[in-house]
């Protein structure tokens, strides 16, 4: 969480360059933001609450600086306030620090500072670090090295010191940080997306490394100050494709891109055999498959586990990363752990990946952001090919996860059962369907949502997973409290909530489960609830007497239905959100990339 920018450049418009780049990181958090410009041996610090655009208010544009750092905050330690907003200065005003991550032992360290009569005014862990830096004698680099060695937790730091002009000091452990250099400028950022416009390549700071960045050179060290070599990474279209185009919101654009994502996957997987290493030898000794992710990616894991188990009959389960790591999981060399993450930086998922590695499990990951920490930590990476996803709600990346899990399940079926299904042909079949079929009804449906007091999503099997994801999308950006549950669970408690002000979406895409889903609809109707059936099956009129409206999405072979049925719900969430006057790109309290546990 939080976004960091560091910049060394020309004397003109430094603040503008920094703030424009910071805006590209707004998806990481937008509770408050701040900038520090190094001007005439002084640090000029300016902060504001709310969105980054507020940072321009009262900013002193007369300052002529060619070096600065900035931060967009998603509060973890301490409330949203100017005092807690980064950058933080040390008490002697020699150090200025921005930080992404969590320092777990900061309260103990704060106590130590107090014992030395150094008062920390705010509530953040970062301010403690800024003050710890002053305690160490020696060079700037040595002070940084000594300080970070006593920190527990995760961090990406961008630091300036008054005695070292035009220099950025960077350090990372368990939080991403990148730096790029051209003939004229140096830019450090939490995300390479900032490099798309002006740079050809960039460096990803290795885990546990420090970097000293100046206009003429960039040098990397390990935590013992031994110089290390770091390879450059080329800037790709992925980093360049970060604009809204003609859309008002990224969320709208990203839903519209779903068919292109499928096309990208078909092209990319046709030209490269990403499944090559997952051969018979690789799968032979595996006795358990665990799919791990958070939020929407966890929902994709639930779906993926159903796809894989159905096709291969191998034991396959999905796990929420934050629960998995603390559940004493049984993992060994016969376990296959499959990690799924859009950003590739989610701290909870990354922690599970480390655990899987320590226990010698086989590791595959489905990741959208190339070169992300999860991608770099995995033996086999299955790219999601969704292009940059900027809206905080995940839409096209979820679809991409389902497409890739579907392909993986077919590949594993081929490998385990010595079959030869043409995977690309199957995807091409999906490509001939229509993801946006009947979306003109969504407007009316969103009016019904807005009139309802309670919204429920129910389904069985894969449809239950779609119910979970549909509910998450709606609540995430409309703040409407909704409940998703398996149809069969209604009568075990939640049915007591259903009344005439309730709207229930019943999702039914499997013929053999239709009658059971319709029975649940009858249970709801007799309690006065309104029912919208979401299906692509043929349902006889006489079976629909308890249903108020049937939303038909595109008819397809059953095994493809779950990949089609989520799109109307993604649209419904966005439409309803816009009617309420909220931004679908930036829901309150949330951030796109959750790099803290
Ligand atoms: C919901 C959403 C989140 C993410 C979750 C995991 O719309 O976007 O639930 O899915 O934070 O993020 P990644 O996929 O980056 O690991």
Image (cartoon, rainbow, N blue to C red):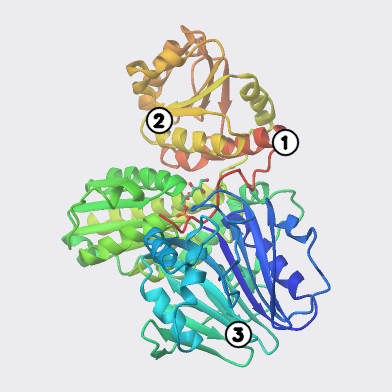
The residue carrying mark 3 has its beta carbon less than 8 Å from ligand 1: no
Decide if residue 24 is on the left or right side of residue 314.
right
Measuring from the top left, give residue 340's x and y in whole percent. 40, 55
Q: Which residue is mark 2?
A: 510
**Label 1: element kind:** loop
Q: Is residue 529 above or below residue 573?
A: above
Q: Earlier in the sequence, mark 3 or mark 1?
A: 3
Residues tagged 2 and 3 counted as in contact (Cβ below 8 A): no
Measuring from the top left, give residue 148's x and y in whole percent. 41, 74
Instruction: Give the residue displayed 65% in from the left and 19% down from the top.
Output: 451
Measuring from the top left, give residue 117's x and y in whole percent. 47, 67
Most extreme residue toward the bottom, as rendered? 216
**Label 3: element kind:** loop
Q: Nearer the viewer, residue 520 or 481?
A: 481
Decide if residue 312 is on the left or right side of residue 537.
left
Decide if residue 426 is on the left or right side of residue 96.
left
Q: Which residue is mark 1?
A: 581
Disc 3 and disc 1: Cα gap in Å? 43 Å
Disc 2 and disc 1: Cα gap in Å? 36 Å
Q: Which residue is mark 3?
A: 167
């Amino acid at each position: 969480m939080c976004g960091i920018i560091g910049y060394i450049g020309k004397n003109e418009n430094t603040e503008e360059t920094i703030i424009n780049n910071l805006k590209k990181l707004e998806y990481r958090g937008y509770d408050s933001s701040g900038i520090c410009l190094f001007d005439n041996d002084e640090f000029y610090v300016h902060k504001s609450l709310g969105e980054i655009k507020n940072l321009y208010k009262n900013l002193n544009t007369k300052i002529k600086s060619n070096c600065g750092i900035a931060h967009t905050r998603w509060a973890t330690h301490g409330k949203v306030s100017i005092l807690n907003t980064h950058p933080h200065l040390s008490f002697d005003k020699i150090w200025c620090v921005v930080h992404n991550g969590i320092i777990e032992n900061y309260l103990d360290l704060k106590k130590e500072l107090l014992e030395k009569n150094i008062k920390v005014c705010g509530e953040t862990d970062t301010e403690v670090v800024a003050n710890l830096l002053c305690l160490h004698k020696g060079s700037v680099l040595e002070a940084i090295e000594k300080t970070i060695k006593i920190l527990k937790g995760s961090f990406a730091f961008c630091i300036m010191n008054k005695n070292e002009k035009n220099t950025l000091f960077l350090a990372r452990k368990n939080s991403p940080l990148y730096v790029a250099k051209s003939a004229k400028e140096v830019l450090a950022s939490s995300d390479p997306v900032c490099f798309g416009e002006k740079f050809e390549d960039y460096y990803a700071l290795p885990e546990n490394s420090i970097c000293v960045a100046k206009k003429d050179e960039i040098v990397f060290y390990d935590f013992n100050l031994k110089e290390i070599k770091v390879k450059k990474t080329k800037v790709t279209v992925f980093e360049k494709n970060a604009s809204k185009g003609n859309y008002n919101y990224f969320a709208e654009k990203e839903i519209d891109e779903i068919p292109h994502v499928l096309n990208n996957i078909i092209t990319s997987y046709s030209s490269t055999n990403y499944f090559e290493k997952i051969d018979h030898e690789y799968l032979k000794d595996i006795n358990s498959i665990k799919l791990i992710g958070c939020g929407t990616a966890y929902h994709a894991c639930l779906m993926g586990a159903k796809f894989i188990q159905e096709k291969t009959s191998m034991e396959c389960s999905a796990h929420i990363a934050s629960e998995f790591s603390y559940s004493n999981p049984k993992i060994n060399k016969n376990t296959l752990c499959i990690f799924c993450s859009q950003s590739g930086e989610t701290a909870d998922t990354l922690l599970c990946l480390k655990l899987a590695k320590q226990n010698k499990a086989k590791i595959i990951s489905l990741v959208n952001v190339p070169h992300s920490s999860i991608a770099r930590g995995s033996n086999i990476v299955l790219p999601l090919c969704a292009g940059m996803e900027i809206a905080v709600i995940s839409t096209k990346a979820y679809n991409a996860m389902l497409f890739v899990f579907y392909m993986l399940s077919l590949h594993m079926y081929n490998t385990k059962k010595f079959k030869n299904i043409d995977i690309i042909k199957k995807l091409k079949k999906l490509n001939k369907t229509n993801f946006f079929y009947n979306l003109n009804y969504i407007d009316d449906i969103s009016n019904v949502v807005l009139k309802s007091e309670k919204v429920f999503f129910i389904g069985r099997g894969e449809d239950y997973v779609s119910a979970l994801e549909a509910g998450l999308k709606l609540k995430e950006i409309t703040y409407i409290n909704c409940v998703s549950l398996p149809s069969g669970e209604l009568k075990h408690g939640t049915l007591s909530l259903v009344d005439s002000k309730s709207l229930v979406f019943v999702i039914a895409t499997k013929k053999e489960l239709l009658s059971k889903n319709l029975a649940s609809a009858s249970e709801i109707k007799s309690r006065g609830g309104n029912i919208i059936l979401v299906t692509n099956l043929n349902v006889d009129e006489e079976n629909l007497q308890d249903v108020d409206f049937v939303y038909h999405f595109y008819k397809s072979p059953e095994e493809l239905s779950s990949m089609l049925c989520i799109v109307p719900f993604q649209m419904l969430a966005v439409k309803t959100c816009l009617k309420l006057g909220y931004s679908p790109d930036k829901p309150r309290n949330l951030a796109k990339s959750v790099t803290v546990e």
